[in-house]
Image (cartoon, rainbow, N blue to C red):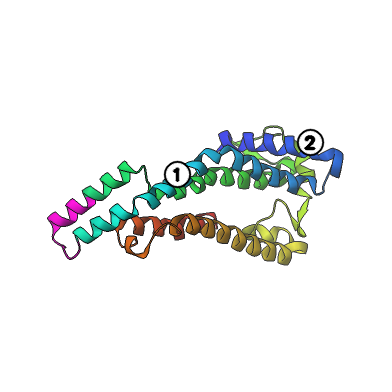
Amino acid sequence: MSLIEVPIAWILVTIHNLLVPIFGDGPGPAWPLAIVGLTIVIRILIMPLFFRQIKASRGMQLMQPDLQALQKKYKGKNDPVSRQAQQQEMMALYKKHNANPMASCLPLLAQMPIFIGLFNVLRALRPLAEGTYMKGGEVQATLGPLNAELADAANRSKVFGAPLASAFNTASEFPSDELTIRIVAVVLIIVMAGSQFLSMRQLTMKNMPASSMDNPMFRQQKMMMYFMPLIFV
């Protein structure tokens, strides 16, 4: 994960340095806002995937008349030969219209390793500040541009009263802030998972008539829509 963690650390420190003249150095809002800035940078970088997602969604919309005709053609035919023929014709339709039901998952899949990398960077703040950060079996003084001084400042920064480097499963390590950490973590998890689910549902369902929802590819896409936000939790 160092291939992801080091660039993330560089982006965080760079954005933080840009915010220092406004919010000051040391612990403070510059570090949480640097994470917001990182999120914006990630969104910009994966913009092509969002465009592909929209294009695939439009393709799904354009192919609906053909898909409905195909379903009508094979209505009541449940024998293996008919099912196989229907699947082959359905795949040909997807190819013709450049439609891909799984395209709505691409931005989420692209963000997953980045968010895992960010989590690892935040988890490394306290060990870096204390000089106990281990990597490859050896103590490391830095993580990219993050040295002990910067890590200490970031570690002491707070989001809604919860330390920036804390998490729900590490709340017990911060006795004075444990309850606040758990409350903030639960709220942020619900907001994040809910927003991911709603955005995927909007792109998945809005162009799909009820008659098109009874096919294996759509069921697969629907399963991913419910499953993917849970991975982030």
Q: Quadrant of residue 179?
A: bottom right
Q: Quadrant of residue 224?
A: bottom left
Q: Circle 1 is placed at which residue position?
A: 55
The disc labelled 2 sits on which kind of residue? Answer: Asn
As displayed, is residue 119 above or below residue 179? above
- On the question of residue 149 being in view, the answer is no
Residue 82 place in picture, x, y as percent: 15, 56
Q: Tell me the quarter of the image containing the C terminus.
A: bottom right
Rendered residue at 70%/43% (across/down): 37
How far apart, in angstroms, are the residues tagged by discs 1 and 2? Answer: 38 Å
Q: Nearer the viewer, residue 139 or 115?
A: 115
Q: Amino acid at mark 1?
A: Lys
Quadrant including the N terminus: top right
Q: Judge whether residue 82 is colored magenta.
A: yes
Q: Residue 142 falls in which quadrant of the image?
A: top right
The segment highlighted magenta reads 75-87
- Which residue does the image show at 67% across and 32% down from the upper left? 144
Q: Secondary structure at mark 2?
A: helix
Please provide percent x and percent y for residue 192. 60, 57
Q: Which residue is mark 2?
A: 17
Q: Quick one: label 1 or label 2, which is nearer the N terminus?
A: 2
Which of 3 and 49 lies nearest the eye of the viewer?
49
Measured as percent of width and height from the top left, residue 67 is found at 29, 54
Q: Is residue 57 above or below residue 11?
A: below
Name the residue at 37% across, 46% down: 99
Where's residue 183, x and y in %? 68, 66
Residue 177 showing in the rendered view: yes
Which residue corresponds to the image point at 29% horizontal and 47% vertical from the top-left? 93
